[in-house]
Structure formats: C-alpha cells, structure tokens
Image: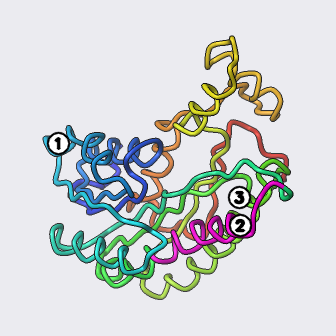
Amino acid sequence: MDLQLTGRRILITGASSGIGLATARLLAEEGARLALCARDEHRLRAATADLAAVTDVVLASCDVTDRVSVDAFVDTAVEQLGGIDGVVCNAGRSLMRTLDETTDDEIREEFDLKIFGALNVVRAARPALSRSDAGSVVIVNAILSRQPELRLAVTAAARAGLLNLSRSLAGDLAADDIRVNSVLLGLVDTGQWQRRFHESGSSDDFDAWSAEIARDRGIALGRFGTADELAFPVTTLLSPRNSYMTGAALDVGGGVHRYV
C-alpha cells in the first residue's frame, strides 16, 4: 500500500534512538524527507548517518523544553525542507519512582518535559503545518496516561495531562486542517529498559528477564514491544490516507491495558 508519504516533510523529536529513530528509518523507506532532533547532536548524527543516502535529512540539537531552542529547530527545518507536513512529538522518558521517592524538582521536570516537550513543538510548527495539504501531528504517549502505576506515579500523571492536552490540540488545530493523534505505548524494548536490565544484575538474558516483567505487568502477548512495532502505527497516522482521523489515541501495548 502506498501511504502517500513520498516527499512529505516530517519533523521528529527524540530521534537519536528507540521509537524516534525507528520511525525516521521507516519514513525514509516511504520516501519522506526528515528533520530530526535530539539533545545530543553527536549521538544523533552517528545514529542517522546512513539516512542521508536515502533521503533529505536535517539534523539539529534541540531541548524540547526550551521554546527558543524549538523555534530555532523548526525554523531551520522549514527553511531547508521548504515546509513541514508532519510532526512526531517523541522526546521523553519514564521516571521509575514512587511519590515518596520523587523530589519536587523532579516532578516539575517531568511535567515540563511531557507537556512543554509537545506543546512547544506544536506551537512552533503550526504555521508550517497549516500551509500543508495534509498537516498531521502524532504524539507518542503511553498507556500509563489511562492506567497509572505506583512505580511510575509522576510520569503517569504527566502523561495523563499530555493525553488531555493532545485531545484539546486536536480540536484547536482542526481549524487549520491539522490532525492530532496519539500513540499509547506499553513496555517497549528501548535503551531505558536495557539499562535497567544491566543494573538488575540478573543471571537471565534480556529476553527471559523482560518476559518475567511482562508476565508481572499482565501483558497479554507475554513480551515487550519493539521500536519497529511502534514506528509502524506512528507512520500510518501521519499518512494522508488517515485524513479523517483526529483526536484519537491508539493503544499499542501488547494487551497490557485494563481499561475498557
């Protein structure tokens, strides 16, 4: 199926690893032109070095919580690509702490990253997206936004706020024919989980270790997801073929959800 993404100009935050990088690779295969950012530009350039042979790629260091930094990145993307057709707000992390273990500063930082990390990017990109005939925003969020866990209490609260904000943005940006949708991930094999595995001192390999966690968390498919498995729904939501879909939250968590 042709997703009609050839030549489309897509901006992705948090693109140096994990879901952001996997999405960039899939979009490049579909013929999209890319603007990619991450906090560590050296790491970003190393991770995406092969993409320049496939498509046009704009790379930059960007702190998504800093509006000035975001504005500069978006301006560069618009200048070098000639516009923006899609945005993937992917920059993020999880703070695995209970409420008692989390400081006030960490709580503020988590909300700053989740809320302004998306809002700054959408605000900056809106004028360019409004000039596209297929403007689309995909916000990478988590099932935690709908079913919190005590071990991730602050992250869950921040993600719930982001989900609510995303729905409001969908209503607001519809006036400019810009679609806004969310992908809600469950447990995904990314660098964060690899680090936790190595810190655990487990005698099992990663597959066995993560499968035990999957069973404990009640993941129906019995395993973590992969970045590639998340990249596909993100990419399809950007497609002009999804032109009547906005304000939706797509659950991609291997059956871990408990809500109806």
Q: Which of marks 2 and 1 precedes in the sequence?
A: 1
**Which residue occupies 74% across, 54% down?**
144
In the rendered image, which residue does mark 1 sit on?
54
Q: Position of residue 112 (x, y in %)?
A: 59, 72
Judge by depth and name the residue closer to the eye, 96 or 81. 96
In the rendered image, which residue does mark 3 sit on?
155
Q: Position of residue 22 (x, y in %)?
A: 40, 41
Mark closer to the observer (1, 3): 3
The CA distance from mark 1 to mark 3 is: 36 Å
Q: Where is residue 74 in the image (x, y as percent from the top left)?
A: 30, 73
Q: Quadrant of residue 109?
A: bottom right
- Magenta region, residue range: 101-120
The amino acid sitting under disc 1 is Val
Q: Is residue 140 left or right of residue 35?
A: right
Residue 239's mark?
none
The amino acid sitting under disc 2 is Ile
The amino acid sitting under disc 3 is Thr
Q: Which of marks 3 and 1 precedes in the sequence?
A: 1
Judge by depth and name the residue closer to the eye, 177 or 99. 99
Other-residue count near label 1 (Cα within 10 Å), few / some / many at <14 / 14–19 / ≥20: few
Q: Position of residue 168 (x, y in %)?
A: 62, 80
In the rendered image, which residue does mark 2 sit on?
107
**Which residue occupies 24% across, 69% down?**
77
Asked whether the residues under the numbered discs 1 and 3 touch, taking CB atoms below 8 Å apart as contact, a structural biologist would say no
